Amino acid sequence: MTLSDHPLLEVTGLTKTFPVRQSLLSRWRGQPRRAVQALTDVNLSVKRGETLGIVGESGCGKSTLARTLVRLYTADSGSVRYGGQDVLALSGAELRGYNRRVQMIFQDPYSSLNPRMTVGQVLREALGVHKMRPADQIPARVSELLSLVGLPAEAANRLPHEFSGGQRQRIGIARALALEPECLIADELVSALDVSVQAQVVNLLLELQERLNLTVLFVAHDLRLVRHLSHRVAVMYLGRVVEVASTEAAFEAPKHPYTQGLLAAAPTLDPGSRSLEPAISGELPSPLNVPSGCAFRTRCKSAFGRCATERPLLSDTGDGHMVACHLYSGAGPT
Ligand SMILES: Nc1ncnc2c1ncn2[C@@H]1O[C@H](COP(=O)(O)OP(=O)(O)O)[C@@H](O)[C@H]1O
Ligand SMILES: [Mg+2]
């Protein structure tokens, strides 16, 4: 594996809101338009050949981030650079080229696989649209792709519904690989699968990442899933990145109180070490009404005065361990 120092993907100040439909009455009353703050000032960078795990509770903006990166959603502001290109400004052939190099794989490939097309037809279509191979080499490439994801060659003759959930994920991965991407964005790829099948698909992804030197953004709400295959982990809370660290540091020495709470809440295999007290108290605030200052302060046991008034910025606390928390940014609680 080669990790170059230069980031392949660099996200700076990425912000995305979704306007909320307003009733006629509230408009007539002149009430301000409301918006869901799905992403606020997100900063991230990913090196070539690196797997970045992106974790956080449901609703914290992970899918919005993934979709904004592949231009399925339009960002409100901020920048995304990929290999020196300004992604948010791409159009035409350049955008198609980017969309080939950066492939998104979804949680449920079944909904995106045409139920009447055989797996072979799905893969031949993917190869054909982007003219990945001359016609006479396509059958061999279809078999090769199936073998890459651990499916037998005869899978090509079958329809999606004939496969299990884990196998359908393999088909989704094969379809993405047909386009010879450099970067995969996997959004909750295995979240709907049984635990034993999850491990198999995660292992496949790990193997493919190393073999093809892929750059991977692995999005999951379950911390256990990202640990095994991520080099680094980014933790999101209410549309913001609150911590970025090597996987080892994120799991062994997390700094943000939210990350600490998430880890304490993650089920362990050892029943003796299970704590009964919830590690993070209170409800997740509505993204329509994000708390001022630090968004996590309403649930944070360590919150102090400054947390309500000043938004902590993501900053390096040493060795690239980034955290957005006032406990680490100079003047702490007094
Ligand atoms: N297309 C959309 N229209 C309106 N609101 C959306 C849309 N997509 C996501 N949201 C809102 O943005 C927030 C972040 O959602 P999402 O990115 O799906 O989070 P996650 O993937 O972490 O669960 C949520 O409050 C969600 O309701
Ligand atoms: Mg999601």
Image (tube, rainbow, N blue to C red):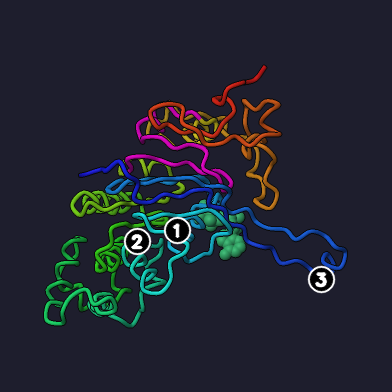
Which residue is label 3 attached to? 24
Question: Depth check: 264 or 42 in front?
Answer: 42
Disc 1 versus disc 3: nearer the observer = 1
Q: Name the residue under label 1.
A: 69
The residue type indicated by label 3 comes to Leu
**122 with respect to 187 (left or right):** left
| Above or below, comparing residue 5 to residue 58 in the picture | above
Instruction: Estimate how packed mark 2 is, as few (under 14), some (14 to 19) or many (20 or more) residues with alpha carbons within 10 Å.
Output: many
Q: Which is more N-terminal, label 2 or label 1? A: 1
| Marks 1 & 2, CB-CB < 8 Å contact | yes
Which residue reaches farthest right? Answer: 29
Amino acid residing under circle 2: Val
| Spot occupied by residue 27 in the image (x, y as percentages of width and height) | 82, 66
In the rendered image, residue 71, in percent from the top left (x then y), is placed at: 46, 64
For residue 31, the mark is: none
Q: Give the range drawn in magenta.
A: 230-255
Q: Which numbered disc flags the more N-terminal residue, 1 or 3?
A: 3
Pointer 1 with pointer 3, Cβ within 8 A: no
Residue position marked by numbered label 2 in the rendering: 102
Distance between the alpha carbons at the discs numbered 1 and 2 = 9 Å
Q: Is residue 236 a member of the stretch shown in magenta? A: yes
* Residue for point 43% across, 62% down: 70
- Disc with the residue nearer the chain's start (2 vs 3): 3
